[in-house]
Image (cartoon, helix red, strand yellow):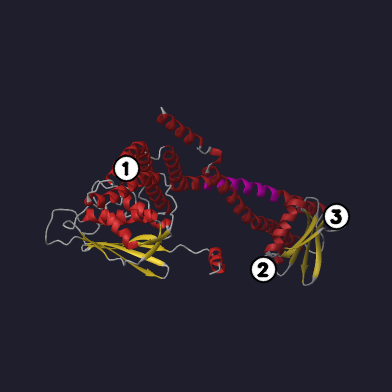
């Protein structure tokens, strides 16, 4: 029931996180494309409407020039009023004049206006001023008189027209409406093409990755929820492959965390009974101390220490499963004696493995005795297991402990003459459940040893692991001296 509820919760979450169409990337892309195309059309429209106004005025001047040629051929006698009115009506003008050789001649006029609002030199317009005048005509014109003048073609004559800007403004508005409609249609077509292209190239893969992430979040332990990357070679293809790798790694880590949680739960269940059994063993071993047999007197203290440490180990494994390793209680230790304790409890004889304690008897280290004992025991047991096998008198099985100091940093070397670690074990050396070099191993030993070394502010590293053996180095710096304690010691009288 709990699993089905979790699945239903994941399904509800996936459904709740679906992005509505109105807020999706596709809709935003369409609107932005239309907006940008319209903006581009506006930038194109400004010079085009200015050019439309200029061409409209040039056409009127060209028509006036043709009519002027007919009027000037009629001689000094002016044409009749009806002819002038018809000509002016066709041009939408109030008056037509021509300037030739510095002499102006009024060819036709309906009535002379009292004033002219705007003068336009058609041949002298520059782009910026043409755009400004065109916008002024569109938004402020319609009831003004303007004087347009300039040469026509290759003629040396200059023609002038006085006309209302109302027809010009009406023509410009029609032109602007046509351009706006055309721009909108172009924007829609462009947006559709861009949307279709980008939707196939980007939006669909992004949606697939989004659905995969939501589905994976609902059931990260299900391998079917991991995205199947495509064969694309672009950025999205890289993102798909990285997402698949990340989901796979996360699934593996979650599996390991579950394994650790199960281990902690299992140890917690047996810990109570284990303590009772060990307590009984301790009571029996205490009575062994009363025996007068020299062999019993020699072995009984080691047995007591082994039982005490067995209790601590069961609690230590439980603490590791809960990532609650205790802080070290550091003291000055004689390392050589601690190494003897470790080798004495390995349970191996000299006929199996030769053990050498090359640590100087006066070598001291600042560490937690129990935690350092656990580190050395894990390394020593791994080494002994690596050298285990059929006995061969010609094979050298040797486990060596040595130590040196550089200033305030102590280094302990644990070396064996075993076959070395396989490549897979070296790749996942300190990873729980993956770093074991033997079949059936959990890899917890090295993981615990590394964590304990780091709690001391030091490190555990593999120096060498070839066919001639394996060497581990434990580096532990001395505990820093607090300046207040040092001052207090210096002030204390001798």
Q: Which residue is mark 1?
A: 282
Question: Mark 1 and mark 2: span between their CA atoms?
Answer: 124 Å
Q: Residues in magenta?
A: 171-190
Front residue of 44 and 178: 44
Q: Position of residue 474 (x, y in %)?
A: 35, 61
Q: Residue at x 27, y 45 (%)?
A: 288
Q: CA distance from mark 3 to mark 2?
A: 30 Å
Q: Is residue 142 left or right of residue 381?
A: right
Question: Which quarter of the rendered picture does the N terminus lie within?
Answer: top left
Helix, strand or loop at disc 2?
loop
Give the mark nearer the N terminus: 1 vs 2: 2
Which residue is disc 3 drawn over? 111
Give the left or right position of residue 216, taking residue 105 as reference.
left
Which mark, residue 125?
none
Farthest residue, direction right: 114
In the rendered image, the residue lying farthest to the bottom is 101
Helix, strand or loop under label 1: helix
For marks 3 and 1 on the same chain, the one whose residue lies earlier in the sequence:
3
> In this view, which residue lies farthest toward the top?
1
Image x and y of residue 101, in percent: 77, 72
Of circles 3 and 1, which is in front? 1
In this view, the residue in front, 440 or 308, is: 308
Q: Nearer the viewer, residue 33 or 488?
A: 488
Label 2 crowd (10 A; few <14 / some 14-19 / many >=20): few
Q: Is residue 179 magenta?
A: yes
In the drawing, what numbered circle is on residue 154? 2
What distance separates the C-alpha of mark 3 from that of mark 1?
Answer: 132 Å
Query: What secondary structure characterizes most of the magenta part?
Result: helix
Q: Position of residue 56 (x, y in %)?
A: 69, 56
**Structural crowding at the residue carrying mark 1, measured as other residues with C-alpha within 10 Å and reported as few (<14), some (14–19) or many (≥20):** some
> Callout 3: helix, strand or loop?
loop
Instruction: Say left or right for 182 vs 117.
Output: left
């Amino acid at each position: 029931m709990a699993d089905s509820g979790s699945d239903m919760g994941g399904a509800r979450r996936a459904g709740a996180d679906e992005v509505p169409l109105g807020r999706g990337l596709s809709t935003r892309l369409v609107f932005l494309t239309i907006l940008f195309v319209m903006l581009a059309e506006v930038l194109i429209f400004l010079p085009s409407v200015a050019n439309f106004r200029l061409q409209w005025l040039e056409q009127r001047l060209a028509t006036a020039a043709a009519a002027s040629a007919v009027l000037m051929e009629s001689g000094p006698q002016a044409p009749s009023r009806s002819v002038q009115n018809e000509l002016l009506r066709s041009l939408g003008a109030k008056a037509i004049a021509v300037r030739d050789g510095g002499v102006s001649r009024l060819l036709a006029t309906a009535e002379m206006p009292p004033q002219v609002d705007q003068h336009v030199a058609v041949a002298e317009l520059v782009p910026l001023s043409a755009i400004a005048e065109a916008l002024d005509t569109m938004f402020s014109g319609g009831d003004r008189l303007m004087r347009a003048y300039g040469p026509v073609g290759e003629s040396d004559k200059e023609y002038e027209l006085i006309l209302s800007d109302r027809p010009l403004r009406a023509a410009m508005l029609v032109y602007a409406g046509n351009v706006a409609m055309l721009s909108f249609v172009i924007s829609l077509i462009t947006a559709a093409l861009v949307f279709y292209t980008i939707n196939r190239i980007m939006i669909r893969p992004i949606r697939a990755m989004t659905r995969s992430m939501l589905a994976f979040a609902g059931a990260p332990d299900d391998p079917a929820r991991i995205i199947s990357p495509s064969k694309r070679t672009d950025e999205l293809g890289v993102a798909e492959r990285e997402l698949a790798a990340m989901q796979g790694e996360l699934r593996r880590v979650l599996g390991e965390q579950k394994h650790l949680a199960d281990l902690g739960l299992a140890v917690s269940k047996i810990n109570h009974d284990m303590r009772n059994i060990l307590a009984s063993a301790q009571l029996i071993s205490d009575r062994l101390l009363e025996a007068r047999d020299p062999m019993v007197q020699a072995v009984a203290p080691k047995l007591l220490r082994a039982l005490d440490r067995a209790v601590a180990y069961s609690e230590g494994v439980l603490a590791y499963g809960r990532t609650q390793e205790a802080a070290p209680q550091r003291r000055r230790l004689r390392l050589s004696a601690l190494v003897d304790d470790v080798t004495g409890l390995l349970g191996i004889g000299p006929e199996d493995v030769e053990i050498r304690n090359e640590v100087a008897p006066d070598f001291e280290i600042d560490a937690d005795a129990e935690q350092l004992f656990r580190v050395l025991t894990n390394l020593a047991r791994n080494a002994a297991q690596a050298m285990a096998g059929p006995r061969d008198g010609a094979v050298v099985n040797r486990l060596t402990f040595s130590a040196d100091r550089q200033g305030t940093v102590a280094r302990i070397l644990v070396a064996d003459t075993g076959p070395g670690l396989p490549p897979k074990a070296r790749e996942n050396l300190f990873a729980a459940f993956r770093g074991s070099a033997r079949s059936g191993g959990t890899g917890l030993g090295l993981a615990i040893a590394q964590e304990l070394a780091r709690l001391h502010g030091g490190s555990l590293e593999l120096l060498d692991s070839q066919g001639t053996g394996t060497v581990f180095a434990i580096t532990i710096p001395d505990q820093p001296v607090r300046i207040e304690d040092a001052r207090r010691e210096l002030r204390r009288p001798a």
